[in-house]
Amino acid sequence: MNNAAALDVAVIGGGPAGLIAAEVLSAAGRSVSVFEKMPTFGRKFLMAGRGGLNLTHSEDFERFAGRYGAASLALRPMLEAFTPADLVAWAQGLGQETFVGASGRVFPKAMKASPLLRAWLARLERQGVILRTRAEWLGWADGGGLAFQTPDGVETVQPRATILTLGGASWAKLGSDGTWTSLLAGKADLAPFRPANCGFDVAWSALFCERFAGEPLKNVALRLGDVTARGDATIAGYGLEGGAVYALGAAPREAIEAERRAVIEIDLRPDLSVETLAARLSRPRAGQSLANFLRKAAHLSPVEVNLLREAHGLDLPPEPAALAAAIKAAPIALTGVQPLDRAISSAGGLTLDSLDGLELKAAPGVFVAGEMLDWEAPTGGYLLHACFATGVAAARQALKRLD
C-alpha cells in the first residue's frame, strides 16, 4: 500500500525521544506520524516506571552535564536547551507533580510511568499526531520513501523529514534490539554496541556467594583510578551490581577490555576518616569475635565483614590502623562484564561524528535522537533526560529545515 497523504515528519520509534519530538513538531503546526514496531508505545519507559520513574536529576548543572562522559561536549547545548527544570515543568504540565528524593533524583509523585504516558499520548492525539503501532521500519523504498511492515502489508510514506529514535541494544524484548544498524549501513558510522549500567563478574568464594547473594552494600564508595562513586551496591551470584557500580561509568568496562580485569576499591565507611575509624577499633575486644567486634565498633554488617575477607583474606589485620585501612579500601577484582541482554542501557551506536547537529550528513532531512546515538550515562535520571533533550533538539532542527 502506498500512502500518498502529505506528511511533514515521520518519527520512527515510540519511546520518549520520539514522542517528545512529535510533541514539539505538532505544537509548531506540523503534520506528524509516529511509527512504532511494538504493539504499544513507551514500553521501556513503562519498565523504568517500575523503579519509580527517575525523570532527571536536581544537581548542579555543571556536574549534571559532566555525567555524559566523552559525549558531554556534544550533548551540552541540547541539555542547556532542555534543562532538568524544563523536564519538570513539562511533567507538571501533564498533571504529574514531581519531588526530589534524598539523592537529588527527580520522580513523579505517582512513582510510576503509566499516568504520565497516558496523559502524554492524549496530548499528542489532541495536537493531531497520528500514532501508529505494529509498523516496523524496513528501510528506504525505491524512490526514497520509508517502507513499513504493517498488519495490512508493506506501506510506503514520503515525509518531508524523518526523525529516527530507534533505541539502543538493551532490553530487546521491549523493542530496543539494535537491528536498525543494518538499515543505516553506508549512511553513518556505527560504534559497536556494548553493555552499560550493568553488573560485573567477581570470583566470589562459593560460601560467600551462597550466603550473601542478593545482600546490599549500603552507602559505600567505589573507586577505580580517578573515578569515585557513592551509593548502594548489591552482591550478585555472578559478581557486583547496583547504582554505585553503574555510577563508575565506562571505566570498569574499558579496563576489563584492555587488561581483562578492573580492581576497584570499596570504602565501606566513606563518612569516617581512617583515623576516626582506627580510634573506634582501638577499643578493647573483651573476648569478642572479630565479626562481633566489627559489628559493634564499626557497625559493619555480616556481608561487609565477609566482603573484607573476600578482599583481604581470611586473616584480617589485628592492628586498629591496618584494620581501618582495610575497611576503607577493600580491593575487589572485576573480571568480566554482564552481557547486553542483562544491561540497563547500551554504549555504542551511531557516532556523533556522522551528524551535523542531529542530522545525518549522508542523508539530509534525516535526524536522529535518543539511545541510538553513541553516548552513555549512569542511572540517576541522566539516561531519560538525554533522550528527552535529544528528541527536542532533533525536532527543532527538523523545524528549521522545513522552514
Image: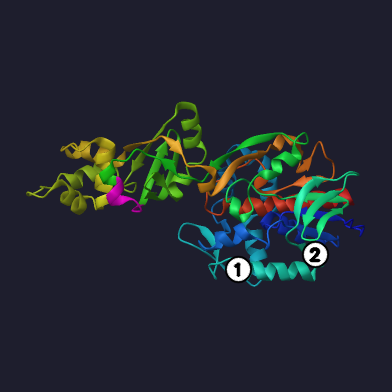
Asked if 342 appears above or below 3 in the picture, the reply is above
The quadrant the N terminus occupies is bottom right
In this picture, residue 316 sits left or right of residue 40: left
The residue carrying mark 1 is 114
Q: Residue 262 carries which label?
A: none
Q: Position of residue 117 (x, y in %)?
A: 65, 66
Residue 2 visible at all: yes
Specify the amino acid type for callout 2.
Answer: Val
Residue 318 falls in which quadrant of the image? top left
Residue 76 visible at all: no
Q: Position of residue 331 (x, y in %)?
A: 33, 36
* Residue 256 among those drawn in magenta: no
Label 1 neighbour load within 10 Å: few <14, some 14-19, many 20+:
some
Mark 2 touching mark 1, by CB under 8 A? no
Asked if 254 appears above or below 153 in the picture, the reply is above
Q: Which mark is residue 129?
A: 2
Q: Is mark 1 on a helix, strand or loop?
A: helix
Q: Position of residue 43 (x, y in %)?
A: 62, 60
Label 2 neighbour load within 10 Å: few <14, some 14-19, many 20+:
many
**Outermost residue, left side:** 287
Q: Is mark 2 on a helix, strand or loop?
A: loop
> 234 or 186: nearer the eye?
186
**Outermost residue, top side:** 259
Q: Which residue is drawn at 33% across and 49% down?
A: 271
In this picture, residue 176 sits left or right of residue 395: left
